[in-house]
Every structure is written in C-alpha cells, then in structure tokens.
C-alpha cells in the first residue's frame, strides 16, 4: 500500500513538472563566422624575438632580441574542402619572416595559424603563443590594397616571442 502511495506521489510530481516544461524550444540566434575573403593574393609578415636574452640586436623596449634562421610555418585548412595547407620559411636577419601566397580564393584567416617549428637557439626555442606553446599564433589583418586583377591583403601575427623550455632556461652571456 505504501509503495502505491509513493508511486502515485512520484507520478503526480512528474506530471506537475512535465506540464511546466515547454514542448517547443526556440533556437538561440546562430552566430555565423565571417565570410571567407576573396583575395587575389595575401602577404603574411611577422617577427621572431627571443625574450629576455641580450643577444645581438637586443631591443630595450621589448626586452628581447631578434632571432635569425627560425623555421616558421603557416598552416591553414581550406574553407570548402578542409584540405590542410602549409608553407614554410626561415626568418631573416632582424627576426623577420615574409610569406607571399597567390591563388588564395576563399582564404579564411580564422582557419590559419603561424607556428615556430624550429629555432637555432636551444635556449630560446619555446613559442609563447597566447593560448600555449602548441596553439599557434593567430593572424590579424594589417592592410588591404587593390592590385591588378583583384585585392591583396597583408596579415600578421605581430611579434612572436620565444623563450626557454623549463629544462633549459639560461641565456648565454653577451
């Protein structure tokens, strides 16, 4: 008898709550990502610096030195095909790197990242990306200009800082 009373009470409570639950849920407004660009070509520029080491070319206001010979990679997924595309280049004196990329219809900078794959300095080889050492640096639009046949855009991750890994945190003496 008691079990029938408990069962009846549970069913009554469920009916009470189920009646309060809406039967049709409206969807939240969907946020669509920005449309892919339609550039004729893009340029990706940036700089690589070793943080806190006073090496040749040291810049006081950055507390960092440029690193030459760093292997830099830009990797993107295709917008429609999800094909993974990568390009590599070494940084030049001053820590600069410069990519040019033609035939980039439907380029979406949100699907691209810049990575440091190798540094010639063992004591300064850990990238300090905003989201961690393996996340890659995001690209930001710097400028657009009209060129023959379309539009050319320049993107940059800005300055990418390298630092030591936990097992090797000593900068050489200048």
Image: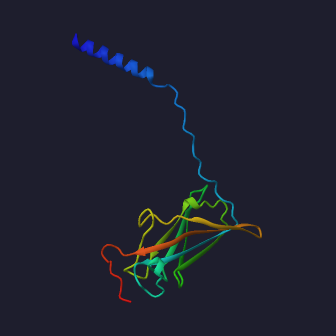
Q: Is residue 21 above or below residue 134?
A: above
Check the image and report above or below for 2 versus 145: above
The structure's colour scheme is: rainbow
Q: Residue furthest left?
A: 2
Q: Is residue 114 something one can see in this rendering?
A: yes
Residue 91 sits above or below residue 82 on the image: below
Q: Position of residue 90 (x, y in %)?
A: 52, 80
Q: Residue furthest bottom?
A: 174
Position in image of residue 133 (x %, y %): 41, 67
| Left or right: 103 as drawn, with respect to 2 | right
Image coordinates of residue 136 in percent, x first then y, are: 48, 66
Image quarter of the C terminus: bottom left
When asked about the image quadrant of residue 173, the answer is bottom left
Q: Nearer the viewer, residue 47 or 62?
A: 62
The answer to whether residue 158 is left or right of residue 53 is right
Q: Nearer the viewer, residue 14 or 102?
A: 14
Q: Tell me what residue is drawn at x 26 percent, y 12 percent.
A: 5
Residue 135 percent across, percent down from the top left: 45, 63
Residue at image point 59% right, 51% down: 33
| Residue 66 can be seen in this image | no
Q: How many marks?
A: 0
Extreme front residue here? 61
In the image, is 106 to the left or to the right of 19? right
- Taking the view exactly as shown, the residue that stands out farthest to the top is 1
For the N terminus, the quadrant is top left
């Amino acid at each position: 008898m008691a079990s029938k009373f408990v069962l009846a009470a549970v069913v009554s409570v469920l009916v009470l709550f189920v009646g309060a639950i809406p039967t049709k849920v409206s969807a939240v407004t969907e946020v669509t990502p920005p449309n892919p660009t339609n550039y004729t070509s893009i340029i990706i520029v940036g700089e690589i610096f070793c943080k806190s080491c006073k090496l040749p070319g040291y810049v006081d206001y950055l507390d960092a030195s440029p690193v030459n010979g760093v292997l830099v990679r830009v990797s993107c997924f295709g917008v429609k095909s999800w094909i993974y595309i990568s390009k590599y280049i070494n940084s030049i004196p001053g820590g600069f790197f410069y990519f040019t990329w033609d035939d980039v219809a439907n380029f979406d900078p949100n699907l691209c990242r810049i990575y440091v794959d190798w540094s010639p300095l063992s004591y300064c080889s850990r990238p300090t990306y905003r989201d961690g050492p393996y996340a890659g640096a995001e690209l930001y639009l710097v400028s657009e200009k009209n060129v023959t046949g379309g539009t050319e855009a320049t993107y940059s991750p800005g300055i990418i800082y390298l630092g030591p890994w936990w097992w090797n945190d000593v900068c050489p003496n200048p």
